[in-house]
Amino acid sequence: MLATAAAVGVFVVSAIAQTPGRSPGRITPPPGGWMEQWIGMFDGQDRAGRVVPPGFKVIIPRELPDAVKAGPHEPDEIEVVESLMQPWARARSEATDYELEDSGQICRPLGLLRGNQTAEFELLTSPEKIMVITWNGGGILTSGMRRIYLNRPHRKNPPLTYMGDSVGHWEGDTLVIDTVGFNDQTWLSRERGRHSEALHVAERWRFVVPGEWLEKTITVDDRFALTAPYTMTRYFKRLPSSTPVPERLCQDTPESRRAWVKLYQRNVRDWDEGRKNLGPDGKLTGVQ
């Protein structure tokens, strides 16, 4: 986590009847100079104790010491998700093996909610799309990339993916993003909150302090996994353009390398054993 800036957030449990992502606002042309304003690097979700935009509260993760949580703060996203999970989703979450099913353990994408609401990120802009490069998940690897398309609607029957199909439009100075087409392999929170393939995420991004503080209001709905939608708001501070981006390698530890070598050696042995059973015609002998 970078020490130069912070992101904070608030939660609202939403029982809205309208479809999340269907904004009541009027679609407008992009604001003038938006690509120059929006391009850049931003700091991710922070702990308590750093600077925040005036008038906003910090989300304090529930695992922090009680002394830290003594001041006024909004509920942690884990608490919100757990309060809204339907029985099957709660049972599925409780049955999830954190180490075996955490997609980040084997270098797969963390998903839209875990990987893109908290981590540092960089925005690259063009008239047709915005590229979000999230710094966790291996920097510019597939697991750290998200594309928000500004020039098309959702694809018909989009393939189900970790990051979903994101399309956006402008309503004044606010970027409105709608994302569907998720698989069910990612989590709603860092504590294994599970969702279905019906997950629907609607976002509204705007600068509350021009060129400095970016606000993301995120509404999460899943009619099969949640009893109601919920909304959370996070604030991200722009970083200086000279901020270095660390190189982060997925599973680059002595333990992971030993596990890889062990797996490789086992596969070599299996291959050698299989070749011993090949006849002169290249087919397995003794196989009917």
Image: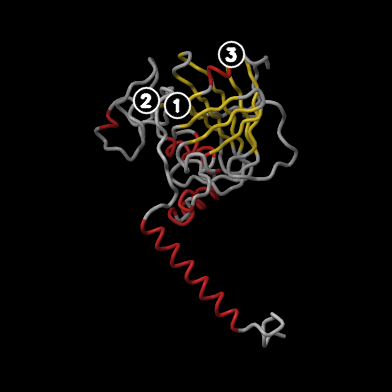
Three-letter amino acid code at the position of disc 2: Ala
Res 213 → quadrant: top left
Instruction: Name the residue rendered at 73%, 42% in the picture.
Output: 157
Query: Horizontally, is 220 left or right of 180 in the view?
Result: left
Which SS class for mark 2? loop
Which circle marks residue 33 in the picture? 3
Query: Horizontally, is 116 left or right of 258 in the view?
Result: right
**Residue with the mark numbered 2:** 5
> Dot 1: few (<14), some (14–19), or many (≥20) neighbours within 10 Å?
many
Seen from this angle, which residue lies furthest front? Answer: 280
Instruction: Residue 208 in the image: state x and y as whole percent.
Output: 47, 15
User: Eyeballing the image, is 254 above or below 124?
Assistant: below
Q: Nearer the viewer, residue 104 or 14?
A: 104
Q: Nearer the viewer, residue 6 or 178?
A: 6
Of labels 1 and 3, earlier in sequence is 3
Q: Are marks 2 and 1 in contact (CB under 8 Å)?
A: yes
Task: Name the image quarter holding the N terminus.
Answer: top left
Seen from this angle, which residue lies furthest bottom? Answer: 286
Of labels 3 and 2, earlier in sequence is 2
Of labels 2 and 1, earlier in sequence is 2
**Residue with the mark numbered 1:** 42
